[in-house]
Image: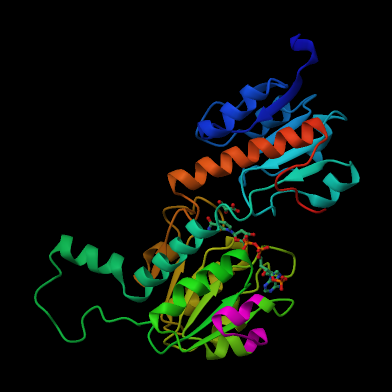
Amino acid sequence: MSGKLMKVFITRRIPQEGMKILSAAGVCEVSQWDSDEPVPRAELLKGIQGAHGLLCLLSDKIDAEVLEAAGPNLKVISTLSVGFDHLAIDEIKKRGIRVGYTPDVLTDATAELTVALLLATARRLPEGVEEVKNGGWSSWKPLWLCGYGLSGSTVGIIGLGRIGMAIAQRLMPFGVKRLLYSGRTAKPHAAEVNGEFVPLDTLVSESDFIVVSCSLTPETQGMCDKSFFSKMKPTAVFINTSRGAVVNQEHLYEALSSGQIAAAGLDVTTPEPLPTNHRLLTLKNCVVLPHIGSATYSTRGVMSALAARNLLGGLQGTDMPSELTL
Ligand code: NDP
Ligand code: DGY
């Protein structure tokens, strides 16, 4: 009987919701990198041999070498993420492999974390917590630990997609005066938040808060560079919860350390993890989180279930609940 089961390789321990769905389906034989840490490349290349399905994470680079190692059985790649910049889409497409991903189910959690990061950065929460602990809190002082507030501000969102829109909806009730956004095309849904579609340069120079929530593409890679930061207001706060590679981190360091911009909050970096001796971590006006945008228990459970259902759809040649159009 087990000879008839399709082979699946899973590159990490994933929440039980997904594992239960796979085992209940009874159509696949699962082998797994049974760890909370990333699968070493050599183990990935070994584990995927002959697989019909792959369930991977954003930290696994799925390129031609991996696809070659898999061989001709591979029908489906299901990633436990909405971002798919780690997948070599052209190589996957030319082999006729289907791709599943996890849009929508993590939108609320990621938008919520983005707002938390923006407020923590703009109102200097990590610095304040540190001062309480290290004795730096001597008294109430009129200008000590002052930051920037959202009320009456202009917010610029780069990439008003699912998450960008959810961020805008959460920020507007703080009294934001203008909501600017940029991207490739104007979005009809922007009307719900009075969003103004503007060229990137306008967004950068007029915003008090800039939030990056676009996907990582060849066009957005390195988009936030020296020239970008030089156009920002010196009082403006920069937030990135998309992908680290959208930002030139050396240029960001210069902008933050020279006072060209006020502060930055990053949930994503290059590389991940960011080495503990990285220059950005020496700056008080830079708040760095370890890529936790979607990290709520329920969201990760739902992502796991969706990734499993996508995988099964691809294995069985039926509909996948969230198939990426290649
Ligand atoms: P969507 O596809 O809904 O949105 C992506 C947006 O990126 C679109 O609005 C698109 O705009 C925009 N975009 C593409 N190219 C450009 C460009 N050149 N300039 C400006 N905007 C551009 O995806 P989601 O909102 O669901 O997710 C967005 C990204 O967030 C993911 O790709 C992922 O990298 C990241 N993410 C991070 C998480 C975290 O934990 N920090 C959690 C989840 C996602 P247009 O349509 O006009 O091209
Ligand atoms: C994604 O899904 O792309 C995130 O980065 C992690 O949830």
Q: Residue at x 37, y 76 (%)?
A: 122
Q: Residue at x 37, y 85 (%)?
A: 151
- Stretch in magenta: 189-201
Q: Nearer the viewer, residue 177 or 42?
A: 177
Asked if residue 46 lies left or right of residue 160, the reply is right
Q: Residue at x 15, y 69 (%)?
A: 136
In magenta stretch: residue 22? no
Is residue 268 something that shows in the picture?
no
Could you tell me residue 34's position as x and y percent?
55, 26
Asked if residue 116 lies left or right of residue 18, the reply is left
Could you tell me residue 45's position as x and y percent?
73, 30
Residue furthest out toward the top: 1
The quarter in which the N terminus is drawn is top right
Q: Quadrant of residue 318?
A: top right
Q: Residue at x 66, y 22 (%)?
A: 30
In magenta stretch: residue 197? yes
Q: Is residue 125 above or below residue 203?
A: above
Could you tell me residue 93's position as x and y percent?
86, 47
Number of marks drawn: 0
Q: Quadrant of residue 288?
A: bottom left
Q: Nearer the viewer, residue 83 or 265?
A: 83
Q: Is residue 150 above or below residue 8?
A: below
Is residue 179 something that shows in the picture?
yes
Q: Nearer the viewer, residue 207 or 160?
A: 160
Could you tell me residue 238's position as x and y percent?
48, 75
Q: How is the image coloured?
A: rainbow
Q: Is residue 163 above or below residue 310?
A: below
